Image (tube, rainbow, N blue to C red):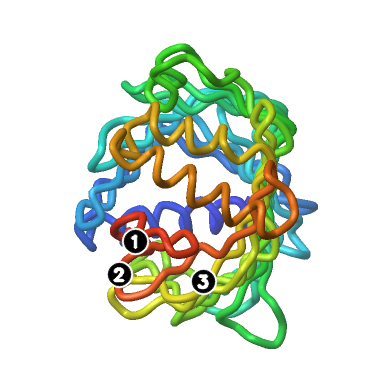
Amino acid sequence: MAGARTKEAAIAGWFEARRAAGWAADYDSLGVAGFPLDFRTRMAGIVLADTRAQLAWTLPELGIAAAAWRPTRVQLAFPPDQILATPRGEVAIGSTALIGELALNTGPMLALRQAELTAAELQIADPDGTVDFAAPYARIARVAPDANRYAVTAGATSLHFDAEALRLIDPQGQRPATVDTLRLEMEVAFDAPLDRRTIEQARPAITGIALNELAGVWGQLELRAAGRLAVDPAGWPEGLIQVKAVNWREMVDQARAAGALPERLARPVEQALGAMASLAGSAETLDIPLSFRGGRVWLGLLPLGRAPRIVLR
């Protein structure tokens, strides 16, 4: 009983500390069972809002489990429905068997060694539409001995857009609603380790990305990418990502249909890319660098516009 009360007091104290730091942090109920072999914590009615980052997370319940003799390995059982509020709007998260696992270092900072999220199904819905992921997974693990570099893998057996989401990215209705074989492998470097300060104080800045593989199949379009980027303190990337696209003309058609490629440029872009593909030996396969420099993005010699800033809120 003393162990359970200590655990409850620690969780209540953390929520109180968040409130003192200016967060909205509340829950309706908290119970701990299982001691002395393990701690099985059940919480209900959870609201966490970081007002500075303008992020809020609402969960009807959450299960937290850890062995008493190994408290830094934690399993999280998420509810079927959650709400994430962001500056861009509210996102509803639906899931089946969404489980998280954390492995933390001992010590006051509880630095992250490894984390994993898996689910049978995951659904992300906002006012622009709904996307369903089949068997999604995401993993992050510290690359020893570098405390600030992490290996990241993520993917799903398929990704399905509902009619509203598909209309947003494919207004002409030329693409199938399902993306197959979605996979990501990369290493990400930060300016500080991922630990409790990442949640309680500020997210660390990304300083570099080594993209080992990004792969997907969308209808007849097959896309693979790999490369390296350095990220400056303002979040601007510099570097090269090599892109290989099979049936690449579908990618141009998609960009034109979505309005990302102006109609007046579509024909010249397709002709230029066709010449590059033919020089490489296959008219239907494009193998070309995506360059990031000076805050701009270039596909081969073709300017695409402003580069995205890579900043964690």
* Residue 97 seen from this side: no
Which residue is rendered at x = 72% and y = 28% of the image? 120
Which residue is rendered at x = 72% and y = 44% of the image? 34
- Dot 3 amino acid type: Leu
C-alpha gap between disc 1 and disc 2:
5 Å
**Which element carries disc 2, helix, strand or loop?**
loop
Which residue is rendered at x = 48% and y = 51% of the image? 272
- Dot 2 amino acid type: Gly
Which label was assigned to residue 295? 2
Most extreme residue toward the bottom, as rendered? 145
In the image, 304 versus 44, the foreground residue is 304
**Which element carries disc 1, helix, strand or loop?**
loop
Sequence-first tag of 1 and 3: 3
Check if mark 1's residue and mark 2's residue have beta carbons within 8 Å: yes
In the image, 148 versus 306, the foreground residue is 306
- Dot 1 amino acid type: Ala
C-alpha gap between disc 1 and disc 3:
26 Å
In the image, 226 versus 187, the foreground residue is 226
**Rendering coords of residue 266 (x, y %):** 38, 38
Disc 1: which residue: 307
Q: Nearer the viewer, mark 1 or mark 3?
A: 1
Q: Quarter of the image containing the C terminus?
A: bottom left
Sequence-first tag of 1 and 2: 2
Seen in the picture, residue 48 relative to 114 is either above or below; the reply is above
Sequence-first tag of 2 and 3: 3
Figure label count:
3
Check if mark 1's residue and mark 3's residue have beta carbons within 8 Å: no
Which label was assigned to residue 194? 3
